[in-house]
Image (spheres, grey):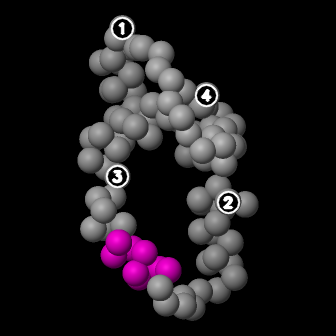
Amino acid sequence: MFGKSFSERAAQKEFSSMKRKISVVIDSEIVRLAKRRAAKERRTLSELVRGALTSYLQGNAAMPEERKMAHHLFCERPMKISSRQLRYVLEEDGTI
């Protein structure tokens, strides 16, 4: 989906006059993937990071116990899905 979500627009409107430039250290592979995703979504890297951080802080991100359960369900045992389903998931994820 292109464009900003409601929560991103609301957060941007609320904090637009209070923006600050910050510096963070991020693994180069994460930066590469983030730039790729931002380009795919026709957004700037700043918009992507701001949206992700806003989503995380609003509680939309998975909690540690949810991530652990998801890892167990999807990574610790084989999954039987068709190649079409796998391709769909990878495309949604932006992997391919």
How many neighbours does mark 1 have within 10 angstroms: few (below 14), some (14-19), or many (20 or more)?
few
Q: Earlier in the sequence, mark 2 or mark 3?
A: 3
Name the residue beneath numbered marker 2: 95
Q: Are marks 1 and 4 in contact (CB under 8 Å)?
A: no
Residue drawn at x 30%, y 67% as measured from the top left: 66
Tag 3 or tag 1, which sits nearer the N-term? 1
SS at mark 4 in the image: loop
Residue drawn at x 65%, y 34% as measured from the top left = 42
The relative height of residue 55 versus residue 12 in the rendered view (above or below) is below
For label 1, the residue is 17
Which residue is rendered at x = 55% and y = 46% of the image? 1
Magenta residue check for 73: yes
Numbered circle sitting on residue 61:
3
Residue 43, image x, y percentages: 61, 31
As helix, strand or loop, the secondary structure at mark 2 comes to loop
Residue 67 in view here = yes
Q: Which residue is mark 4?
A: 44
Going by the numbered disc 2, the residue's amino acid type is Thr
Above or below 31: residue 12: above
